[in-house]
Amino acid sequence: ELKVEQNPLFLSMQEGKNYTIYCNYSTTSDRLYWYRQDPGKSLESLFVLLSNGAVKQEGRLMASLDTKARLSTLHITAAVHDLSATYFCAVDKDGTGANSKLTFGKGITLSVRP
Amino acid sequence: DSGVTQTPKHLITATGQRVTLRCSPRSGDLSVYWYQQSLDQGLQFLIQYYNGEERAKGNILERFSAQQFPDLHSELNLSSLELGDSALYFCASSVSGTQGNTIYFGEGSWLTVV
């Protein structure tokens, strides 16, 4: 059974500092998604990583994927309050390879303090 | 706004009842997914449809069923409801449903079973 682990589950960040959060998964997959969720809201797509070594950046967030280590990282540069949310990673794995079936981690709740 | 529309946004119903959740995918998207989000189970994949046909099944209970209609909207039917079915139900859509597509989530339908 595919397992997706995120750690830490909660992170208190100081404004202006840099942080990295991690997503580990238990089986081979070349496709990993990052989503952001504000409390009680929808999931907003942040990144889709499609191959080993993929790196994508948007604003203060940069995501990378190492399929050999089964690890994705989300790096936050100079945290600001607007980044406070829960961040989910999800692995796209289906036995047939034909369908998209996301398995989510439990999410990491980030809180940025002044 | 992701372009995925879900109704109703909130629903309160009694145990043993049946409800129907409705989803309109983004324009041009052929694949629809249903996910359940609860505090204890996290985000779980329920089922996927592509152009009217079931493509993949996840942890969907036998009391639950879904379908995708010719106009591509989808409905998730939940019957014999139990307290534990209280959750946020997300519909999502993507262009083709194959791995690597960006998957866009709707705002969700909050279901409370009392």
Image (tube, coloured by chain):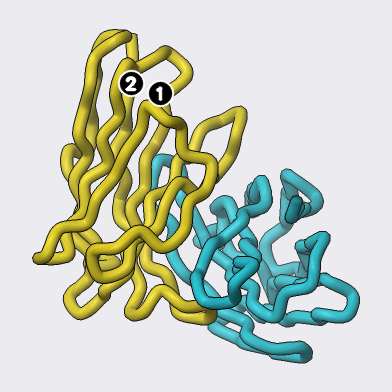
Q: Amino acid at mark 2?
A: Thr
Which chain appears yellow?
B
| Quadrant into which the C terminus of chain A falls | bottom right
Q: Chain of mark 2?
A: B
Name of the residue lying farthest toward the right? A69
Q: Chain of mark 1?
A: B
Labels 1 and 2 share a subunit: yes
Q: Position of residue A41 (x, y in %)?
A: 38, 47
Q: Position of residue B110 (x, y in %)?
A: 32, 33
Q: Amino acid at mark 1?
A: Ser
The disc at residue A114 is: none
Image point 50% across, 71% down: which residue? A99
| Residue labelled with disc 2 | B112
- Front-lying residue, B55 or A68: B55
Image point 32% across, 38% down: which residue? B65
| Residue labelled with disc 1 | B86
Which chain appears cyan?
A
- Front-lying residue, B91 or A9: B91
